[in-house]
Image: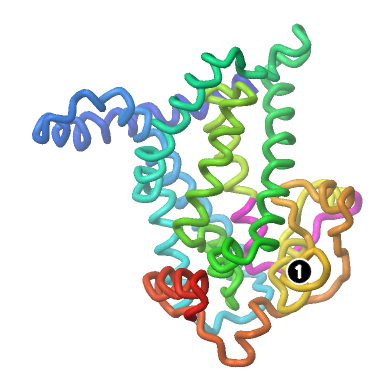
Amino acid sequence: MQTLLSALDALVQVPQRWLFEGVVQPLLYAFGGMRWAEELFDFTEWVVLGAIEVVVLALVLGALERRWPAEPVTDRAAIRTDVLYTLLHRLGAFALIVFALVTPLVDALEGQLRLLGFSRINVDQLWPGVTDVPWVSFAIYLVLFDFVDYWLHRWQHRFGPWWSLHAVHHSQRQMTFWSDQRNHLLDDLVRDVAMAVVAVALGASPGQFVALVVASRVLQSLQHANLRLRWPGPLEALLVSPSFHRLHHAIGHGHEGPAKGVNFAVLFPVWDVLFGTADWRPGFVPTGIRDQLEGRDYGRGFWAQQGRAIGRWFGRA
């Protein structure tokens, strides 16, 4: 794992320095913002990683979707909107907003906890010689983060105002690997703040956190792909597949019932198994929200989707 992190860091360093020294730093000089230089240098890492992700996913998953699509592509305009969401999130625009809002919040929270006598758990130091092995600590953090993500996802479906925002994600009826980032900005902000706080509490290092986020985003893009794909044998029960996750987006199954949906797991289906929300039924299902069949409009473009979600929050859409 340490070798992988080093290789990832080496891949990112050259374009990161070029972006910072050629674009960001001159702007900071021009507007008198050099006090933010160190923080924004770290931020450019996310931009570079996002660009690499977009290129790789477009080449690999795009080719797979064209070769073995689960359903014909009939609404390219909806997919173009999802592309916009993906570029907004992974090329830095939304990340900059989160960075500006979350970093001071997390720093203040950590300082306040220190004053109260609390410190980070530092999971990788719980069992010296074992949990501090890089790949072991990475695996532990990945499982813990996924457990938190499972419950955040259930709450997105359970609480009405939060569902009003999260419904933006589920209103896509033409799912592709681009659909992963189709979220309301407030929905993403709440989740990102929660995950940042968890990272601070568990003691994940910045390098580990970057690797955790990248691994999770890549796998989630795969889950949303327009593919009739189930993993072979027992692997289907170990890692969320496109077929397993598609049922979470299915009309009816994905948003109704006692738990307000099924298959909430982000990476590992074990959480759905343990908490009674797993649904393994086979077959292909159409995606979307039931009231779309009755004519409810969730918006066609980015701004329409963002605005209508706020309207739903206040009972006006």
Residue that badge 1 annotates:
247
Q: Quadrant of the N terminus?
A: top right
Q: Categorize mark 1 by other alpha carbons within 10 Å: few (<14), some (14-19), many (20+).
A: many
- In the image, is residue 82 above or below residue 232? below
Residue farthest left in this picture:
30
- In the image, is residue 121 above or below residue 45? above
Q: Main secondary structure of the magenta part?
A: loop
Q: Secondary structure at mark 1?
A: helix
Q: Is residue 73 left or right of residue 231?
A: left
**Magenta segment, which residues?**
220-234
Q: 223 or 131: which is nearer to us?
A: 131
**Residue visible at 33% across and 27% down in the picture:** 39
Q: 158 or 285: which is nearer to us?
A: 158
Q: Is residue 228 magenta?
A: yes
Q: Is residue 42 left or right of residue 223?
A: left
Picture coordinates of residue 8, whole percent (x, y): 51, 29
Q: Is residue 315 left or right of residue 170?
A: left
Q: Is residue 280 left or right of residue 143?
A: right
Picture coordinates of residue 149, whole percent (x, y): 67, 46
**Residue visible at 56% across and 30% down in the picture:** 209
Q: 290 or 249: which is nearer to us?
A: 290
**Residue visible at 74% across and 57% down in the picture:** 264
- In the image, is residue 230 above or below residue 290? above
Picture coordinates of residue 140, whole percent (x, y): 74, 28
Quarter assignment of residue 161: bottom right
Q: Is residue 143 magenta?
A: no
Q: What kind of residue is marked 1? A: Leu
Quarter assignment of residue 256: bottom right
Q: 209 or 191: which is nearer to us?
A: 191
